[in-house]
Amino acid sequence: MKQRIEYIDLAKGLCITLVVFYHFFTILHDCPPFIRSLSVFRMPLYFFLSGLFFKEYEGFVGFLKRKVNKLLIPFAFFYLVTSFALPNLLYYGFGFTVRNTESLGISGLWAFINQEDFSNNPIWFLWVLFLVNIYFYAILVPAKRLTSNPRSVAAIVTVVCFAIGFTGSVLLGGKHIMCAFMDSAMSALPFFAIGYLFNRFTDILVPNRWDKFLPIFIVACFALTFYVGGKCSYRVNSYQIHPIMQYVCGMTGTLGIIFTAKMLHTLPFVTYWGRYSIMILCTHGLLIHFLMLFVRHAHIHMPSMIMAIVLLPVVMFSYQLIIPLMKKYLPHVTAQKDVIKIKENNIQ
């Protein structure tokens, strides 16, 4: 059994809570500037953490099998269920129109590929993370064949990944030139690469002499992030700040969350949510939609900020029940068990 790093789970728990919190405002169509600025580091944190634990395994076939198990199968399952089967059932069975009901069936698949829009939008991340893993593997392996010097490999990876990242965010950002989120994956690639390099060249994962300065680092990181940062949408590949600041603030915000989690080590419930954040990512949109239907039916009116603060605990604490159920009945489509079997003696 691999021993989990609790503060990493806490960092993911803090981040998924921010993701759920933000999506209340998108559904209410009233997002304050401060909440929009959180987007500069919410998703970069996940890309960074994925890069932090990147492995090549025994070769591309073994690597691909693992990414299909952990990312592609959960994405495919929740896309089919939440963006096809459930909307069809609600529409044709009960006459209830959900978001993008007009894009069901084959047209819905085209909407995903070409329009990059579907009913359960949050699961875009799983597909993009799958693409980012493939991109990075295709960069790292040739770089290691060119040189055995770790610092030279790091230099090659950094230059190539940032060149691709700036191409995605500057040349393609907001233009919708590439389909199936390929440009979004390009823009996110530098955060994945930085995570990989942090693992190789720093002691971020273990206690070290710099930990006594964590409060100072946290204040500095968040001060820069919120002073300079702005809205960044990696889903639609659109950014409202300078590209350099996009990556600088993305990293300072990411490190701010990680340093906060490292200082706290663990928090009740939040660490648990982080460990199973994929389940929350794939289903929280449905919970929010149904909860908002109840609110409207009950004619409850309050400012969007108060509404989000009141309803956020309702959604998050419901996962104390939902997560165990999904672990028991849906382990193969929530990255808890492998669908494609992998021989243990091949693991390095």
Image: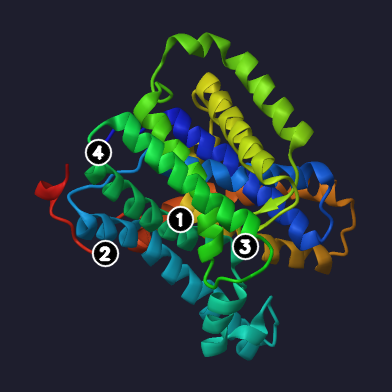
Q: Where residue 129 is drawn, which disc sits there?
A: 1
Q: Taking 347 as reference, is 87 above or below it?
A: below
Q: Taking 183 as reference, is 228 above or below it?
A: above
Q: Secondary structure at mark 3?
A: loop
Q: Label 3: which residue?
A: 172
Q: Label 4: which residue?
A: 147
* Dot in front, 4 or 3: 4
Q: Nearer the viewer, residue 33 or 326?
A: 33
Nearest to N terminus: mark 3 or mark 1:
1
In three-dimensional space, the C-alpha distance between marks 2 and 4, rounded to whole angstroms, equals: 36 Å
x, y percentage for residue 242?
Answer: 72, 45
Is the N terminus in the top left, top right, bottom left or bottom right quadrant?
top left
Circle 2: residue type: Val
Circle 1: residue type: Leu
Nearest to N terminus: mark 3 or mark 2:
3
Name which residue lies at 82% across and 61% down. Answer: 29
In three-dimensional space, the C-alpha distance between marks 4 and 3, rounded to whole angstroms, equals: 31 Å
Q: Residues within 10 Å of mark 3 (few under 14, many from 20)?
A: some
Is the C terminus in the top left, top right, bottom left or bottom right quadrant?
top left
x, y percentage for residue 294?
Answer: 76, 65
Circle 3: residue type: Leu
In three-dimensional space, the C-alpha distance between marks 3 and 1, rounded to whole angstroms, equals: 18 Å
